[in-house]
Amino acid sequence: MSQPFLWVEVPAKRCRSAALSVKSLLWQRFSILSGPRLFEDAVESIPGGGGRNASSDVVTSPSDSYGDAASHHSPLLEPSLTDARDGSNEGLDSTSPAKPSSRTTSASSPSKASDGRVDDLQPFFTSGVPRSLVDYDRMYDEDDDQELGSMEGHGSIIHHLLSQVKIGMDLTKVVLPTFILERRSLLEMYADFFAHPDLFCSIPDMTTPQDRMVQVVKWYVSAFHAGRKSEVAKKPYNPILGEVFRCYWDVPGSSSEGDLVLDGPIPWATTNHLCFVAEQVSHHPPISAFYAEHKSKRISFCGHIWTKSKFLGLSICVNNIGQGCVSLLDHDEEYILNFPSGYGRSILTVPWVELGGTCQITCNKTGYSANVEFLTKPFYGGKKHRISAEVFSPGERKPFLTVDGEWNGAMVSRSRDSQDAVPFVDTQGMATVKKNVKPIAEQTVNESRFMWKEVTAGLKFNQIDEATNAKYALEQKQREEAKYRKENGLEWETKLFDLVADNWVYREPLLKRFSQRYN
């Protein structure tokens, strides 16, 4: 799992002038800005969204309560908002599987795929290719983020940061410089918990409670590496209130054929797919809720994370507050777990990421439990990314299984009866499974990739001004929508998750749908 910390955006030297660079780099706060009715309206049209238009596939037109707030933003963003206002997503078949377009690449000029879309993105910024023909999906298929390099060349921005912060200060209240931007939303990064869907979906196949607990631990300790695309720390987009991300995976070793799950989180996926949906449910504090299920295996996961950041001097810490729950319907078991903290180290030189903290996994029904410790690197010596876990039988204080290694590498286990080390899981030797996401052209305006596509395009081709302007336009729209709600006494209403006690719970989980069917 990637941790949501550090900064976002662009080196000062890329801006048009020194004055503009300061203005462009400092307009964003670390906290997530309030979300707009633009996305509140759109989410009501999503199947399973629970809104008044939930049965329709037509995108609801956004509110223009205070005029055309987008009229002052960069033209890079205009197609997104124009498409939404013109209802260009109307009539989309939300129950059909996403079909990737065929692609042929040309290095010299934009080529066109069989559906008429431009396949080579680079000329989009150099030869006036209509944005409606750009293959935005390819930007997410290509994993080509450049390494950040040293921060030492950004002395003025670092000085500005240090002038604002004190040790232990909550960074959500500080205007931070924006250096590092990963080209995707935090909601999409949470989906990487399930980058090894076979490990997760095999949990209910284990025949004993002990074996099921060990399999939960195996999936858990392998769930964090996939979100880190490089050793250097980068920060995803802060999700907007009401933003949604959806995807599904083909599970290795099993057939993907099956009936469509029309009442599930991904209506165009089948009973043999692992499905995932996430929603940004709160702005203050910034909370992301997410849910996954495999219907045929009768397993689901529901979780939420509230990120709280602190300045530690030469590091930034992000505490991931919240919990998750693995539910096995056939065994009537629930495994409650929490998440490690993330640290952005060496922020004045070349920042890098590590995880730290002790996490627990417990099953109240069986009594099995596990402690998982993410070990931070000592100041002198030691290794990075170490992890240690102990798994306990009910009522026992001595573990029957221990696990050691690196959470982004190889881990070995030792049983109580034999101290011989045996391979447990090797994340470097395991291929991650690619997410299946509906094409951006078919997404509603509140879905992550549609929402951020112009920012992503600008960053991919180093068109920093365009990316900055597009991002600013999104955030300005959020501010105005938040102001509108405040002035009119309106409360934000989530569409996919409900707050139950202290937990955010998916509104239509697998267990509820099965119960309704048989009652």
Image: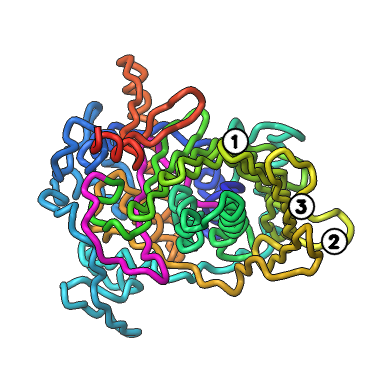
Residue visible at 45% across and 58% down in the picture: 201
Which SS class for mark 3?
A: strand
The quadrant in which the N terminus is found is bottom right
Q: Residue tagged by mark 2? A: 382
The image shows residue 315 at horizontal and vertical percentages of 73, 47
**What segment carries the magenta color?**
234-263
- Decide whether residue 287 is among the magenta residues: no
Query: Which mark, by number, is residue 424?
Result: none
Residue at screen point 60% across, 58% down: 218
Q: Residue 29 placed where, x, y %?
A: 53, 37
Prevalent SS, magenta region = loop
**Residue 254 colored magenta?**
yes
Quote the CA–CA distance across marks 3 and 1.
18 Å
Secondary structure at numbered mark 1: strand
Residue 250: give x, y in percent of width and height.
36, 65
Dot 1 or dot 2: first in sequence order is 1
User: Relative to residue 514, is residue 410 depicted above or below?
Assistant: below
Labelled pair 2, 3 in contact (Cβ < 8 Å): no
Q: Which mark is residue 375?
A: 3
Amino acid on which disc 3 is placed: Leu
Location of the C terminus by quadrant is top left
Q: Which residue is mark 1?
A: 321
Q: Nearer the viewer, residue 415 or 195?
A: 415
Residue positioned 59% across, 55% down in the render: 211
Between 436 and 208, the residue placed more toward the observer is 208
Query: From the viewer's perspective, is residue 308 above or below residue 127?
Result: above
Instruction: Tell me which numbered mark, 2 or 3, is placed earlier along the sequence.
Output: 3
Mark 2 vs mark 3, CA separation in Å = 10 Å
Question: Quarter-wise, where is residue 477 in the image?
Answer: top left
**Residue beneath the point at 67% across and 55% down:** 353
Circle 2 Cα neighbour tier, 10 Å, few/some/many (<14 / 14–19 / ≥20): few
- Amino acid at dot 1: Ile
